Amino acid sequence: MQHSAHQIYFCHMASLPFTALSAHYPDAQCHDFSDGASAALAQSFERLSVALLEQVHQCLRRGDKQLPLVQVILSEEQFAQRSGIAGLFRTIASEYPGFRGQVIAVNAQESLATLTAKLRGNAQAGDRHVEILYRDDQRYALDWQELTLLDHCPSPWRAGHVYLITGGLGAVGRLLIEEILAQGFNSRVILVGRSSVDEQARKQLEAWARAGVLVSYRRTDIADPEQVDNLIGWVLDTCGRLDGVIHCAGIIRDNLLLNKSVSEFEQVLSPKVRGAVNLDQATRTLPLSFFALFSSLSSVLGNAGQSDYAAGNGFMDGYARLRAQRVRSGQGTGRTVSINWPYWQDGGMRMEPRQVERMWQESGLRALSTENALKAFYQALAQGDEQVLVVEGNVRRIRQVATTLHGFSPLAEAPDVAPLATPVARGETGAGSRSALLAHLTRLVAQELGLAEQRIQVDALLSKYGIDSVMMMRVIAQLESDFGSLPKTLFFEYQTLAELADFFVAQHAEIVARRWPAPGQVAPGQVVQREVKDAVFADVPALPVQPPAPRSVEASVHGLAGDAEQPPLIAIVAVAGRYPGADSVDEFWKCLAEGYDGISEIPPERWNADDFYARTPTLGKSTCKWGGFLEEVAAFDPAFFKLTPREASVLDPNGRLFLQTVQHLFDSAGLTRQRIAERYQSKLGVFVGAMYQQYSAVDSDLLSESLVSISSYSSIANRVSHVFDLRGPSVALDTMCSSSLVALHYAHESLLRGECTGAIVGGVNLSLHPKKYIGLGASNMLGSAPDSRSFSDGSGYLPCEGVGAVLLRPLSDALRDQDEVLGVIRSTHVSHSGGASHYATPNVKAQTALIRESLEKAGVAANSISYIEAAANGTPLSDAVEMLALCKVFSEPGVACAIGTVKSNIGHAEAASGLSQLTKVLLQLKHRKWLPTPGIGQMNSDIDWRQAPFELQPTLRDWPQPILTVDGRECRVPRRAAIDSFGAGGTYAHVVVEAFEIAQPQCPAPVPLATEEQLIVLSAASPSSLLSLAAAHLRSLASGLDANLVDYARALRQQREAMDFRLAMVVSDVSELMRSLQAFCADPEGWSKRDGVGFTGAVETPDSRLLEALAQDRTTDSLIDDAVGQKHLLSLAALWANGIDIDWRRLDGSDCHRPVALPLYPFDKVLCWVGAAPSAAEAGSQPWAEEKPQGPLLERIRRILAEVTGLPATTWREDRALSEYGLGSATFILFYQRLSASFGEFALADLRECQTLNDIVRLLDAQPVASIESHPVRHLSRRYPELVALNQGRSGRPVFWIHAGIGGVEAYQALAQRIERPFFGIQARGYMSERAPLQGLQAMATYYCHLILMQQPDGPYSLGGYSLGGALAYEVTRQLQELGETVDSLVMVDSLDSHAMSGAGVSTKTLYLQSANIAIGASYGDDLEQALENMIHQERIDSDVSDDDFLQALAEQACQHSSDVSVGQLMQRIRHNAKVQSAYDSTNFQILPLPHPAAVRCHYLHNRGGNYFGGLQPYLFVRGEHSALGQDDYAQGWKQQMPGLEVVEVDALCHMLMLSTQPALDQIGSYCQGLYAKTDRATPGATENLSAQSVEA
């Protein structure tokens, strides 16, 4: 669709068809909304306003520089639509001041000519009117008339009258009722709201009744016409009359347009728009005294973030005029008024004091007092105006603001006298002004955040400091005092202070120059006298570099095309990879320098080469059994990347290897996630070349093979972007053997286009199955001998495995950040050979043209190239064709040029070959050496080396400095290389790379420490990796340290991620460091106690005693401040080793540091392969691994208890009561699972009867040996700990209930005992185990489908769940139906719908509090009083501290009550469970329709009272946080998806206690008992009877 800068929406009932209208406006995009009169008013308005919202969204998503002019054409009688859309337009303009939206009311009989004239005239009008009306071709605009507030107006209240107030028990409704009371009228009031009445509200209703006003509360959704009709019917039946309606209802979902979703928009519109219409229609025949709509200033003035609220209130403003007109025509009764209220001092919506003060400073407005509000209300009703705007404050200033309501933008008058100093013109703002502006911006943001100014970095993302949208609006408001109206999306578009300053300099140069003049610069209008003295110029240290030779020096001499401006140069700043015989690029260099041979026979761990090898062509066999191979390609570190071994096993090994290589790439570049965010704004692209997908050919089980079969190349790149949170393009490419160099080309182009700020380019290639060799052999592409090498008289190429990656970024950025520049890309070029030759045969003309075009693109001469990395792979014909093309291009004499190819050493790495070639070139540039070519037996007879302008290098030798003679002068040019890469399918790639020699940067000296001691920190994701890392550093130091110890220590602190397992030490020299590392490697456990100069620790299990001793009643922040200020390195070491993260820049000073080469991260090596069993070490560490009984029974039980509780095995005495250990219910379930996995099937109830360990021993001794195999259910539970058998049912189909929000299934235990069929709870993955949680409810449901299908292969299935579990059960139902399975019943116990979940996000502290208190409460069963006595109230814990300090305090309190672990262990458990809950991402859950809704019987067990938290809210939310849950009837949301939903009312104290207190538990149990009767399906009649009984209960 073609987008236009002019959008026209035809909404009036025109006499001309839309096609004629739209054809008349070819330069505009026209939209037909002329069905508004025939459609329902509310729905047609919502459709139009949503369309306008989406139109703006499209422009914002496209990044349009300017929003379009939008004109909406309506008729005069469409009052509500006109006012509503005008309110929307005013808010858009408040966020985007350049936006113009016009609502134009015309005559329905307008001709095309007059309509066109009016539209064009308004488009060109100089005013800013929004709402425009034409009568008799006369143009009118909305205006306001000032009224004086009268001292006295008659009261509208009458004794015995009945008034209906929507908006529930909000503050406005309460104030109105108090006013009725104060005036002594014995009236009756009906309050209407969506939420249920809590205890406090009931007491308030009783108090009003005692005072003389009978107030009734009715729970009604006023957006539902049927419910409103029922409400009015009830009022008339109960009260006999209705005299007045006050519509105060509304909700706010403040969000800027950029982030405003359609669902959010519609939710806010609904109560305002549909509510007003429904109330009017339901009361139209009643003799009302008044019908009042409580609107807002937002519809008149617009308000950033409230586009929906402004539109809804605007609709009510217009609807008041519509209703008043109907009343005048006899279609209703009563005064109608819409009142645009400002901020009420005593209203329900609260503003911060600073916002109130800002309102006063900007406009003279004060918060409206209740006294004046009531007076204004009475006067509005008495005067009879249809719309009244009420404000309070300074009259003079308010009148000035009121002029803006006319829509004019008055121009400032020209000054009579010109300033003596010349104003700075736009675009001439100096660097000094920008610096002063930056200082001002820094000050504003620092004040808002409460941070010291020096902590704010101008190039850092503001999101890093935790700035939120509210803070943004406050800063923008302060900036508007200088700059006038600003876009409210400013901080979304410009995300650093530097970007923000550049915006102001570019768009508001005059203001910047005047407001923040540079030192010595005269501001406009300012007269300055100054004495001129001798100027002194500071000597700025230069940055000596050898720049890339300009095109004008070389190209003009050598006949290349003109002097067109070259694009910015792209630098390569890091390289990583693994190749045969080399696990790093450093090892690769050593091997290549020795001229090594990386070719070997196919290793037996791939396949038995002899089984598939034949000397002569044979069907089903290959004539090749050689190649280059990597070691341990099945090994991977799943825990490092938050994966389980089982998950990792179904990932393509290509992707796994590339993930680890990218981590090593970041290690080489010294990049942490924080640095990626700061230096690259996370806009790193990922471009990877790959070709074969052989993993699916590996034999395995059906499920693993199926999962592997749907993998794609894209996941290789996409998973990298996901794991490292990279936001740039993420693309996998397959052009066969040129894949990785083509990936380099597209990455290079993406950087030049500005799509990303950096790019990872990679290639990966593996040989995983003999079919690859068989297929390539059948295609005559493989060599038949191990000496079939590049440039030889061979028979084909030898495949090679490899994985490589490089990091690209603009050269200017690399120099700014002091990156090591390994090379500069002068050009990349890609082409195809076309159809002139046979497919898959080389084309000399195409290759020649490619190379020439690439050199021309680079702006360099062919004779300036001093090294060529050829694509030659050992296939005689293709090698000869390439050499012929090279000779054609490089025939002119020039610098000495060598040729070679890495393929002669390692073979042809196919998709990764381009990266292997580039890596070799970069290593040669770094070391300034030409690498040797291994000996070639029989040379290719088709290559004439005597005529070639380059030669192979037999030995390692220096790469001489290239000198080019131009016009008799010798010109020094950079070492420069050309790289060829040709795909068999005809996609060719060529790259020109050169050296960039730079002197050592002038860096500030490191901040001197108080002593010569240095703080060394190492960390890893596991204890074994930490040990390996320490050993790697020891080896590196033993081979010689390239940097001084100060730089080495600083690099460890700043260039490496802080991971979970940590080692920190203080040393004074390298030898002491080596001795400490040796001691740690020899004794990791006892090392820290050796001499007190170092610490080991883990984030999840800090040494609480040590931290308490260090703290001495200080907070963590103050402790860090003191340690940094005093340079107390040992304290910093102790804090960091025990999980306290520290901003090391506070210790290290300047960010400008020379790069330091550090050892790469040593990944753990876990076997991850389809069909492979876990290693013994892995199995022993997993709670779901099968365990064979070993050792004395009592000791085995103790080991299991130690494993599930964290308490040492020696603490578990056999005769001590288990209750004394505080074994919580969740831990008890895990203990039961582990016992069942180890000893076989037994009843959970039997275990609960055991009082001591001796009792458990006797119980297990009595179990028959055959029990281990008697029930396959437990075998599945061993593999999947999420599946918990909650009863001993043995017959009938299983019942599956899915966990609620906390993650466990303990709440279902009592219910399960009532069910005869097997009853399984499915708990969240990671709950009470170390498994990584799943991300998102959809993904969780997919996994749960897998568990259910594994347990019960055939349907039908019976599913259920409480709260969040019901929503998950619904999604599982949907996915099972998509798979063709049948679900016979779905039970949802008071489950939230997606709308409710979207607003249910909470802070980390609240997650911690909920996790702790729910665990405590669960340990007391249905003893609510005892549970509340022991749970932790929000007032008992300080929430104004860091998350870590809060968790520490919470765990300490919890351990005093009902915890079975130490403080540190409980902290670890709570933190892990909070991660599990955060992973739900329930705020983004969308309810999708069931494929077959009629095929499943759906039961919704609804909390009749609607109370959600009861008295538990203070135990589940920290101070300052609350939840609006319980205000809606969530069953209605589910009814939209399941029209046949059966809703069963349950009498519960509150939602949170539905499964733990009576009578709710009995009601739910009885209902489910009938539903899950022993037969697979209960009879319809039985279920209906249960439903009726349940409702009566």
Image: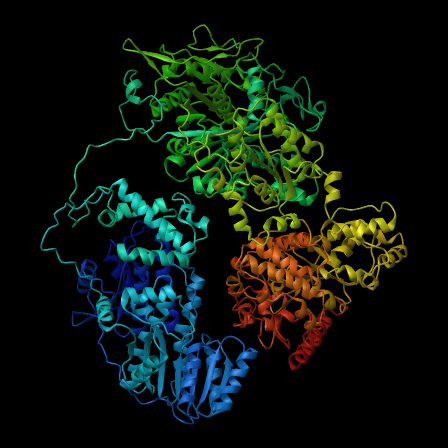
Q: Quadrant of residue 1397?
A: bottom right
Residue ranking furthest to the top:
946
Residue 1089's x, y, as percent? 69, 39
Q: Residue at x 44, y 63 (%)?
A: 264
Comparing 822 with 31, the one in front is: 822
Give the x, y percent position of residue 1006: 46, 33
Residue at 30 percent of width and 60 percent of height: 93
Which residue sits at x=40%, y=36%? Answer: 750
**x, y percent for residue 1052:** 54, 35
Residue furthest toward the left?
416
Looking at the image, residue 1023 lies above or below residue 1258: above
In the picture, measured across the screen, residue 554 lies left or right of residue 1378, that is left
Q: Nearer the viewer, residue 101 or 1157?
A: 1157
Q: Is 416 displayed left or right of 1188 in the figure?
A: left
On the image, which quarter does residue 1175 sit in?
top right
Q: Quadrant of the C terminus?
A: bottom right
- Spot occupied by residue 445 in the image (x, y as percentages of width and height): 38, 52
1385 is higher (above) or lower (below) than 418: below
Please determine whether, in this image, residue 1521 is positioned above or below residue 748. below
Q: Please tell me how many numbered marks the rendered image carries.
A: 0
Does the rendering let one see residue 514? yes
Is residue 1588 rendered to the left or right of residue 861? right
